[in-house]
Image: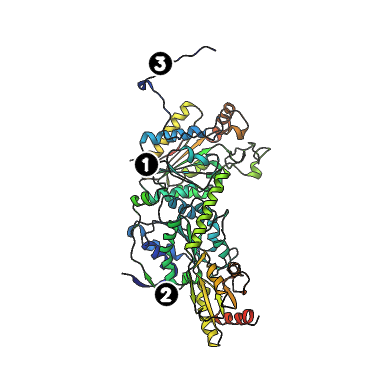
Amino acid sequence: MKELRLMKGNEAFAEAVIRAGADGYFGYPITPQSEVMEYLMAQKTHERTGMVTLQAESEIAAINMVYGGAGCGKRVLTSSSSPGMSLKQEGISYIAGAELPCLLLNVVRGGPGLGTIQPSQSDYFQSTKGGGHGDYRLIVLAPSSVQEMADFAGLGFELAFKYRNPVLVLSDGAIGQMMEKVELDVQQPRFTDEEIRKNTPWATIGKTPDRDHNIITSLDLESIKMEQHNHKLQEKYRLIEENEVRYEKIGCEDADYAFVAYGTSARICQKSIELARAEGIKVGLMRPITLFPFPKKILNEMTSRVKGILCVEMSAGQMIEDVKLAVEGRIKVEHFGRYGGIVHSPSEIVEALKKQIIGG
Amino acid sequence: MAEFKTNPEILQPENLVYKRTDLLTEKALSYCPGCGHGTAHRIIMEVIEEMGIQSETIAVAPVGCSVLAYEFMNIDIQQAAHGRAPAVATAIKRLFPDKFVFTYQGDGDLAAIGTAETIHACNRGENMTIFFINNGIYGMTGGQMAPTTLPGMKSSTSPYGRDVATMGNPLKMTELVATLPGTLYVTRQAVHTASAVRKAKRAVRKAFENQKLNKGLSFVEIVSNCNSGWKMNPLQSNEWMVENMFPFYPIGDIKVSEEK
């Protein structure tokens, strides 16, 4: 039986990771996501399911704890907000290089630098284009409701283990802090040692006589081997692009124009659609749910119907680069951003649509 | 040279006094001839073999000369980002509290870039072991100044000798972690002579046995040489270590907590 509750996005995520059978959370406080660790600590996860919850000395230590746990085949995660995620990038690169499964949550705030504690979407580049050093990709899920904060915990672990790849839930300060009703899944059991041995035979849980010693590393000093390893990673990313694209289309059937927006921006765009349609402007919304893999194909197909696209982002224009690549210059693509912690109003989005796309 | 012949009759199993541990792989060590790392690897692996805990042990290798420790140690092992081994090991031990977990780190890794991780793992009293190989220099990157480089000591980034007025003082990390309530056993050893190796091995054994007590972290420093980085031959480097490193980093137990 699913359970219905009224929760903050951050709390819903925390409750959902417990129920998804997580083994370990390693974090460091930062606004606006501290409720994740606070909730886990209040839940006494170790008593409830045996899950370890540990407050690390820094975001750097926390992500390296995730590396250690993931290397043991455990379901482990960390969460942070933008400045903290910047600190984690080295560790994420190592995790991607060593092909370890883990779950990451970024409740984005405005930047650059210490920026602001208000919601933003200005970490799109960092999240989808690498973030750390080297050629790697994260699977990036963008929730736009408290329900999706909960749903993407379980989905995130599933994808992480399916591909041996870190999965990032890219949220923002609004989704993390707001309260909504949420349907929670039933408790899943944590992995047993036997399951770890069987399902993740590469995990370092103690060398037994029946196998060679397991090594978790991202290093190979022989360049030809490192190139082969990179080929393998790239093949995996192509497979992810083939299989894991997720998106939602709202009001696009008869639309002459489209908004492309994710997360909080996508919610605001739904109100803008109502306002625009009341004025007779047929506009719809394409909401990418996976930012990597990006829904390129569906956007390309939309160009046969819509005359123009307005990218609505709480950034100075980051996702728009992927949108432009996807539409291949067939139609007009413009960006309308508010940033530094400012959230769009629905009416200013409609005005931007009229000015930049319809009238432009 | 006198001809040396072995009497085949003495080549019997009961006469075997030394055998290379199976817990070292067949790979040739990447260390310079004369370096202490090989001996340090050997005594750790011998202790794991003697305790019969190969299948119960998970290790974490650092960044530095011993980055490839995972190729030589025949146990499950993870290679950590520079300085982060204590954080990686913390998670492993918390998730598998019944396993034996250790890190193997050099001075740059442990006492410079990883200072925070070292201190906090020690202060939390993580029930694991840290092996700290201190040769006062960055060996792998080619002999740069380390946090443990002695005053006046030359390196490629202190070519006129370490000037403490501008380059700071060497850090005695082992004395520092001994002050923390989370450490159970803190000792400083060496591996330059047969007797030092025997003592160091006893310390390694104690550090592993301590994990059964679940009373805090065991920290074993091994003062070692870097003949390549110090630009000496192996013998000279061991002599230089005894004359210069040991007075600053004295050998012996620093903290031995009462056991029940």
User: Where is residue B88 drawn, in percent x and y?
Assistant: 46, 49
Q: Nearer the viewer, residue A55 or A215?
A: A215
Q: Are marks 3 and 1 in contact (CB under 8 Å)?
A: no
Give the residue type at disc 3: Pro
Quarter holding the C terminus of chain A is bottom right
Disc number at residue A180? 2
Side of A31 relative to A40 (left or right):
right
Measured along the vertical axis of the image, is residue B191 above or below residue A258? above
User: Where is residue B157 drawn, in percent x and y?
Assistant: 65, 41
Q: Which residue is mark 3?
A: B8
- What secondary structure is found at the residue carrying circle 3? helix
Q: Which residue corresponds to the image point at 60% horizontal and 42% vertical from the top-left?
A: B169
Q: Quadrant of residue A112?
A: bottom right
Q: Residues within 10 Å of mark 1 (few under 14, many from 20)?
A: some
Quarter holding the N terminus of chain A is bottom left
Give the residue type at disc 1: Thr
Q: Which residue is mark 1?
A: A208
Q: Nearer the viewer, residue A120 or A217?
A: A217
Mark 2 vs mark 3, foreground winner is: 3
Q: Nearer the viewer, residue B78 or A5?
A: B78
Measured along the vertical axis of the image, is residue B103 above or below residue A314? above
Q: CA distance from mark 2 to mark 1?
A: 48 Å
Q: CA distance from mark 3 to mark 1?
A: 36 Å
Which chain does the residue under circle 2 lie in? A
Residue A343 visible from this viewpoint? no
